Image (cartoon, helix red, strand yellow):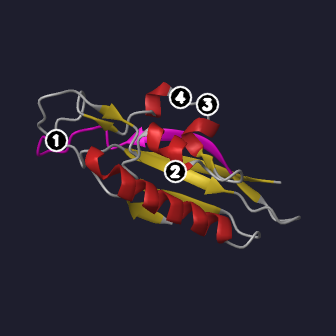
Amino acid sequence: MTSHLESCKGHAAERMKQLRLVMQRMTDAADDVTVLFGGDTNLRDTEVAKVGLPSDVFDVWERLGKQEHCRYTWDTKTNTNKTVPYVSRCRFDRIYVRPASKEGVPRLLPDHMALIGLEKLDCGRFTSDHWGIYCSFVAGS
């Protein structure tokens, strides 16, 4: 699943409502499938803490050890596509996983994560004002 959750600080209530819906859909999925949800969530850590993650859902970045090199997906310090009078570094883009739980079904688990789109195009701009997330997975038991 993918989505672009509500933007901007002032829309936290709507964004948390959207996150609750996503988490419910992930939890409701059949136990013989792995569910991936990723996108421009615009989430702040405090919002995720307020909503909470179901016990069977995890944040890929956290699961892989909260590596600093791929923490900030929206970074006005480095990404010059947006002109703002302040420096803001946020982890707006996230990937969540709910592994399959049925006996005998392989579990898809994250193996590696990196940011992409860090190079400027020939026009002198980045692909987006957000960095992309590249994530690889392995099938386990």
Q: Where in the figure is residue 40, as x and y percent of width and height?
A: 37, 53
Q: Residues within 10 Å of mark 4 (few under 14, many from 20)?
A: few
Q: Earlier in the sequence, mark 2 or mark 1?
A: 1
Q: Residues within 10 Å of mark 3 (few under 14, many from 20)?
A: few
Question: Please, what secondary structure does the residue beneath circle 4 have?
Answer: loop
Residue type highlighted by circle 4: Gln
- Given contact means CB atoms under 8 Å apart, are the residues at marks 3 and 1 in contact? no
Query: Which residues lie in the magenta part?
Result: 109-125
Residue linked to disc 3: 65
Q: Residue 81 carries which label?
A: 1
Q: Which of marks 1 and 4 is nearer the N terminus?
A: 4
Residue type highlighted by circle 3: Gly
In the image shown, does 109 or 95 lie closer to the viewer? 95
Q: Where in the figure is residue 114, as x and y percent of width and height?
A: 47, 39
Question: Please, what secondary structure does the residue beneath circle 1 have?
Answer: loop
- Given contact means CB atoms under 8 Å apart, are the residues at marks 2 and 4 in contact? no
Q: Where in the figure is residue 119, as x and y percent of width and height?
A: 27, 38
Residue 11 part of the magenta-drawn span: no
The C terminus - image quarter: bottom right
- Given contact means CB atoms under 8 Å apart, are the residues at marks 1 and 4 in contact? no
Residue linked to disc 2: 95
Q: How far apart are marks 1 and 4 (CA)?
A: 24 Å
Outermost residue toward the bottom in this view: 30
